[in-house]
Image: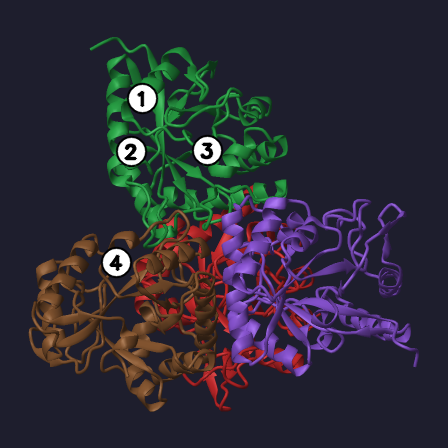
Chain colours: A green, B red, C brown, D purple
Amino acid sequence: MREMVGKIDLNCDLGESYGRFKLSLDEEVMKYISSANIACGFHAGDPVTIRRTVRLAVENNVEIGAHPGLPDLLGFGRRWIETTPEEIENYIIYQIGALEAFAKVERVKLLHVKPHGALYNKAADDERIAKAIIKAIKEYDENLILVGLANSKLIEISKKYDLRYAAEAFADRAYDKRGRLVSRKLPGAVITDPNHIVKRAVEIVEKGEVETINGEKIKLGEIHTICVHGDNPRAVEIAKILRKKLIEIGIEIKHMAEIVK
Amino acid sequence: MREMVGKIDLNCDLGESYGRFKLSLDEEVMKYISSANIACGFHAGDPVTIRRTVRLAVENNVEIGAHPGLPDLLGFGRRWIETTPEEIENYIIYQIGALEAFAKVERVKLLHVKPHGALYNKAADDERIAKAIIKAIKEYDENLILVGLANSKLIEISKKYDLRYAAEAFADRAYDKRGRLVSRKLPGAVITDPNHIVKRAVEIVEKGEVETINGEKIKLGEIHTICVHGDNPRAVEIAKILRKKLIEIGIEIKHMAEIVK
Amino acid sequence: MREMVGKIDLNCDLGESYGRFKLSLDEEVMKYISSANIACGFHAGDPVTIRRTVRLAVENNVEIGAHPGLPDLLGFGRRWIETTPEEIENYIIYQIGALEAFAKVERVKLLHVKPHGALYNKAADDERIAKAIIKAIKEYDENLILVGLANSKLIEISKKYDLRYAAEAFADRAYDKRGRLVSRKLPGAVITDPNHIVKRAVEIVEKGEVETINGEKIKLGEIHTICVHGDNPRAVEIAKILRKKLIEIGIEIKHMAEIVK
Amino acid sequence: MREMVGKIDLNCDLGESYGRFKLSLDEEVMKYISSANIACGFHAGDPVTIRRTVRLAVENNVEIGAHPGLPDLLGFGRRWIETTPEEIENYIIYQIGALEAFAKVERVKLLHVKPHGALYNKAADDERIAKAIIKAIKEYDENLILVGLANSKLIEISKKYDLRYAAEAFADRAYDKRGRLVSRKLPGAVITDPNHIVKRAVEIVEKGEVETINGEKIKLGEIHTICVHGDNPRAVEIAKILRKKLIEIGIEIKHMAEIVK
């Protein structure tokens, strides 16, 4: 085996079912990732689902994070809602607390927080929302790691406020030239071919760069974690070969807490 | 002033607004009580309301408890839903965690849990539901105090499982001869006359007994806390004179954590 | 081809997705049924899903009915909620109106109403709830057909109040000896083997009887419609072979409006 | 009494309670208005509340309209959600149908539709959203009257698509110089002094103009209806004196259906 030349975290959004409404293949994908971002009940997830997902993460030695979203089950938290920073701050606190309760009863630690959907994208550029998220986390537990889009305002402000952060990249989502994710409503926004995804992931990890939807290369800078989407029908296959490939080229798969400063 | 001859906690269900939908006179009633049971978002309450209510409690030196309910905003958690013990256990864990998050950011401790509405009444007689609630609390934090109806199954099983409990009595609700609360749908279920409420409270505290809706006296046994309803239009007035009267007859108003073993 | 010796309606519960949360294989199963019971937004379904499902029914020449449920998305309307008859009456009116709005914009008629889940089962035995449902339908449109469990109180009271009804049987659900459906929580409640389902359906249609979970035969009496569950992973296959088999033995598949008096 | 020199409709947003969460003083304000815009369950309102409100309108000889909003109970439909025109179109159809069901069972006609909150404000300037609303209404029932802000895109497009409309003005809300409502989050956005409100209403009706928050006069053009807010604590008093004053100066209070072409 090659010498390990780097480390990366593989994260996946999980626990996204709601009662009988099932989403994501949690059981299978858990085997190949290092971090689980667990939905907290606002855009997806319910108490029984959260419990089950936390247990599954524990069994698979996967670290646990909260994945708070906007209170919009119908829109799956993907539609921005004109909320105030005060609302966002408290929505985040509420959801982290709810999620951590299950970590507590299952005797594991909550290590990170990754905002979901429209909240994640909004925080990439909107300073007021980014600050509200950071404020919530710092108030709640200043040791938590905030996961945000590489090169985003959210990451920039996390540095400024001295909050630990993990810069995230997406191998299966198209980027625009500003380094933002192309809206899911546009054609080509989601990449589904496993080989293409793996190729992009390798480039992200090895060179810190990615090809945009228009074919240019852009720099993403330091990347601590790569997102593997659990709702892709081929998610399990992708996670599996991505993990294998990264190890082959000498990259260790580690939880972000072992990677970020 | 008379010598203090006993102690009682005065609790009130608060934080029951939901966005613009306002319920209860939190600001005013907070001055006269010792414990606040704060709605956690399932039957009432939302993150901004919870934050505000926790702050208000802190300012008024009132202790904080979680008031988890059934997921039924439309029915205000007052309609029993045919849930499983597993569902109840996880609904409770979720809500306690969400509430405690706000206690944490406001630097206070969460001290008790009081099930709300249909959950409270169901747990008074249904052993499976009572056990699910107790299990949730013990898993989450075995130092929390569970508030339940005096003489109920919930209290009986708390003793058996060695969970600290506070036996609660209602001065403003009619009792049946079994010591259960008369359904709010029946006439006479809610007592609104302040003098009558105070008279009943005194009898509860001094003699451990209450008059049923049919005029008989029944024994309630040890009582640690009396509930003052915040949604009564005269709630503030009632809380005020009740507190005054209890002090006059030599009863100290103390938080339940200083009363229960 | 054999001479047609009888008629039956095949109905299926459809439109049960909620935003991104997908349930049922609407597109495929639509080809084999004669009536679609469309979720109305309380236990499942949302406006965009309803629109799409109504269109799909129209394209497949399938008749449309409302499938109102309890306001419990998390429990998928399968948990009884202690509602009043007044609540049920108005929940039904609301949901029928919402559903009919889409029939109206797609220029088709709403022909039937089938209560969903816990409401359906409760109405099989609880006279107050059965009457509330019947009252709602008669107030709204007395020409609608009410679908209820064969031999249930709901059917009995429909006759008494002169409301058109369709007696329904389930080929894929276990019956108890009273002719009630065995709770989904119990083992053996749901039959998944396509051949077994078809065999039962034939017996129901030809003899008006069904085998209970304990192996006895019970009489179901007149049956106007058979339910094919859309959430069974093999739903499409089952609907297909069931339709074929029924036609082979001389049964015409007709919408219930052409079958009931 | 003076000769009647003009006509105006007085409308009020009603039926905004949600279960036990009470809003607006429906009973009292109903006596002084000519049109009720009834919440349809998305931002406020529930089936039992809708039923009660429709009955109340009938008893008071007040005409009924649907008041559809965004699916955001927590935000009371006042926060814009990044929805698609397809979503808006179907949300409107759903809510009109649900509301009309109650008009139907109470044997009255639904005459108008007024979008609520963020939907109303968005439609004042966003052509795609305005068109989605108009499309929904025309598909559902082309005889309905659409209520929109005077001089808004919504009114302009209604004319273009030949949909009947009622141009609305607000006597109790501040305007900016473009003739748009000042956001409720800004100071001075809501006018609460009854005399001031009446003075503004008279100016709106007599001259078709209103004073902006900066003290300039702007032309509103033709006005068919004035909104009286039911959630103002002095709503009843305001409605009462407004009605009286308008009659005194020779203005008839008529339902919008008798005013618009």
Near mark 3 (Cα within 10 A), the count class, few <14, some 14-19 or many ≥20, is: few
Label 3: state its secondary structure. Answer: loop
Q: CA distance from mark 2 to mark 3?
A: 21 Å
Three-letter residue code for mark 1: His
**In the rendered image, which residue does mark 4 sit on?**
C230
Q: Residue at x 68, y 80 (%)?
A: D61
Q: Residue at x 33, y 78 (%)?
A: C123
Tell me residue D214's x, y (percent). 87, 45
Query: What mark, if any, has residue A186 been given in the picture?
Result: 3
Q: CA distance from mark 4 to mark 3?
A: 31 Å
- The first of marks 1 and 3 along the sequence is 3
**In the rendered image, which residue does mark 1 sit on?**
A196
**Quadrant (top left, top right, bottom left, bottom right) of the N terminus of chain C:** bottom left
**Chain where mark 4 sits:** C
Tell me residue C52's x, y (percent). 39, 54
**Chain where mark 2 sits:** A
Eye-nearest disc, 1 or 3: 3
**In the rendered image, which residue does mark 2 sit on?**
A235
